[in-house]
Image (cartoon, rainbow, N blue to C red):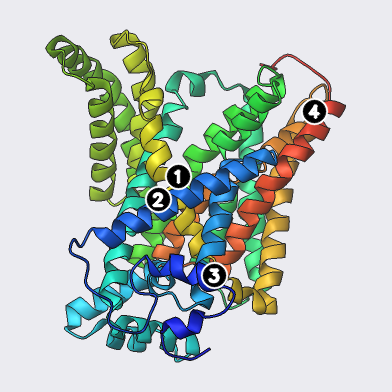
């Protein structure tokens, strides 16, 4: 295998794989013919990502696991094989936010992308490989595909958090009982402290914001994964299920607030009490204001649009509010996903009241979710660099972070009354899923989470998600049934 980017690198029994990868835009080192339409390499990239996500999701569902695991695994497998075979486009995709930093440096300083990569990255064989790609005729194609897939994945995050909000009504949050709030409180404090402590033990030189970011990532509980497991087990009416889902809602809301505060710290470099109070106040005012204004003005707008009899008004209005809310959140210095979540909190019940239609907004968004949300998870999987696990420190980090993640949530179940299955509640709070990946992606974009830590966090998400179904089946089988305590 040569150091150049040629087809000869991919010769041999694995040539069939190389041929497929070359379709993405230049697997060879020669000068590939420029496509007639610049959208062509993007189209084939999307087809391959969508097909891989579908296949991975199908296979892991057959094994009784959530589809998100398959999407992550497909991204990991394809990107690392492509990197091994020196495939340029996917090799660029696996770099994630590093590529955007290189682009920003190149454009602002009027230097080439390769020069920017040399200046920003350490002088390693990996950097030299990236420089070769950016200098090759395939470089522009790789950057073009990366820009589109990256933007699409960011929109997918917004849609995903909007959907999480749709599944979490304000009325439901009011009904969460004292037990659910206690579970949520312990499920926030314990992982936050354990994550901070784990980072301190692993690296005494780690910055405070790095330690806190890992703790915040461990706070998240995946509402969707937990709910899906209970539905599959036909146990959704159990008291434990209601408590877990209520506590998971509180976890996600407070986790988003913590993310907003911490992102503000990293962006401004200020770690002071006034800064904490200001960012927290902005987050609280934004969420409460969005919900309050939404509940007040949205019914009027919905009734007006209903009279206009515009086709697909529910879908258009819903997405419009989600995107506008996400934009406004960014405008006031918060993460866009906070705005999307706030929009989802109020719209589903609103539409059910005002527009007596057969399909819910959640149902109407299902095709869009199936189309673009897997792109985010496949891209997250692509950014897991398996070579980082050649470093013993990364392996230890993954094991320690996973242990902190499991313990931090399992202990939350022990604040429940003894008549409930405490182990079921704790295990049900364990899967991190999409929300933790989103938080990790935000941290990677801010430069707080490095490649090794990001890989460790993705492994933590996968392990906690995979452990939950069998452990929850066992815990529910040994627990008692009880009514929801007030």
Q: Residue reaching furthest right?
A: 478
Please report whichever mark, 3 or 2, sits nearer to the chain's N-terminal start. 3
- Residue 380 x %, y %: 48, 58
Q: Can residue 261 be seen?
A: no
Looking at the rendered structure, the secondary structure element under dot 4 is helix
For the point 40% across and 67% down, the residue is: 93
Of badges 4 and 3, nearer the viewer stands 3
- Front-most of 427 and 390? 390
Q: Badge 1 is on which residue?
A: 256
Please report whichever mark, 1 or 4, sits nearer to the chain's N-terminal start. 1
**Contact? badges 2 and 4 (CB < 8 Å):** no
Would you say 328 lies left or right of 176 here? left
Q: Badge 3 is on which residue?
A: 80
Of badges 3 and 2, nearer the viewer stands 3
Q: Badge 4 is on which residue?
A: 476
- Cα distance, mark 4 to mark 3? 38 Å
Would you say 288 lies left or right of 78 here? left
**Contact? badges 1 and 4 (CB < 8 Å):** no
Q: Quadrant of the C terminus?
A: top right
Would you say 194 lies left or right of 263 here? right
Q: Can residue 44 be seen?
A: yes
- Residue 326 x %, y %: 29, 42
Q: Residues within 10 Å of mark 1 (few under 14, many from 20)?
A: many
């Amino acid at each position: 295998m040569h150091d150049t980017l040629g087809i000869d690198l991919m010769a041999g029994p694995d040539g069939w794989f190389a041929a497929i990868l070359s379709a993405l835009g230049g697997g060879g080192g020669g000068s590939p013919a420029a496509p007639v339409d610049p959208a062509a390499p993007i189209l084939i990239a999307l087809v391959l990502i969508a097909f891989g996500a579908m296949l991975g999701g199908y296979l892991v569902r057959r094994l009784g696991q959530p589809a998100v695991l398959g999407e992550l695994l497909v991204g990991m497998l394809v990107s690392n094989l492509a990197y091994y075979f020196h495939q340029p486009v996917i090799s660029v995709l696996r770099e994630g936010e590093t590529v955007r930093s290189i682009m920003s440096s190149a454009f602002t300083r009027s230097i080439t992308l390769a020069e920017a990569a040399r200046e920003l990255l350490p002088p390693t064989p990996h950097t030299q490989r990236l420089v070769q790609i950016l200098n090759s005729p395939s470089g522009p194609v790789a950057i073009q595909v990366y820009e589109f897939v990256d933007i699409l994945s960011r929109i997918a995050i917004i849609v995903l958090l909007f959907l999480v909000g749709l599944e979490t009504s304000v009325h439901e949050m009011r009904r969460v009982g004292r037990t659910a709030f206690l579970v949520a409180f312990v499920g926030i404090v314990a992982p936050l402290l354990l994550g901070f402590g784990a980072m301190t033990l692993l690296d005494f030189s780690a910055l405070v914001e790095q330690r806190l970011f890992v703790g915040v990532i461990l706070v998240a509980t995946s509402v969707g994964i937990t709910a899906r497991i209970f539905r599959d087990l036909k146990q959704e009416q159990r008291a434990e299920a209601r408590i877990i889902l209520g506590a998971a809602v509180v976890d996600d809301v407070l986790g988003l607030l913590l993310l907003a505060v911490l992102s503000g710290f990293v962006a401004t470099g200020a770690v002071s009490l006034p800064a904490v109070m200001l960012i927290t106040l902005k987050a609280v005012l934004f969420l409460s204001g969005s919900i309050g204004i939404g509940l007040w003005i949205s019914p009027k707008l919905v009734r007006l649009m209903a009279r206009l009899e515009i086709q697909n008004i529910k879908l258009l209005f819903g997405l419009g509010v989600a995107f506008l809310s996400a934009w406004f959140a960014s405008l006031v210095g918060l993460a866009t996903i906070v705005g999307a979540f706030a929009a989802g909190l109020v719209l589903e019940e609103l539409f059910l009241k005002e527009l007596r239609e057969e399909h819910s907004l959640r149902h109407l968004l299902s095709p869009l979710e199936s189309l673009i949300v897997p792109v985010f998870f496949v891209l997250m999987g692509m950014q897991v660099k398996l070579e980082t696990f050649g470093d013993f420190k990364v392996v230890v980090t993954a094991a320690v972070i996973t242990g902190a993640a499991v313990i931090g949530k399992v202990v939350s179940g022990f604040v429940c009354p003894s008549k409930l299955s405490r182990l079921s509640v704790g295990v049900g709070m364990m899967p991190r899923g999409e929300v933790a990946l989103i938080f990790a992606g935000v941290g990677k974009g801010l430069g707080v989470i490095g490649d090794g830590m990001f890989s460790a966090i993705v492994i933590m998400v996968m392990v906690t998600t995979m452990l939950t179904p069998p452990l929850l089946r066992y815990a529910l089988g040994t627990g008692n049934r009880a009514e929801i305590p007030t």
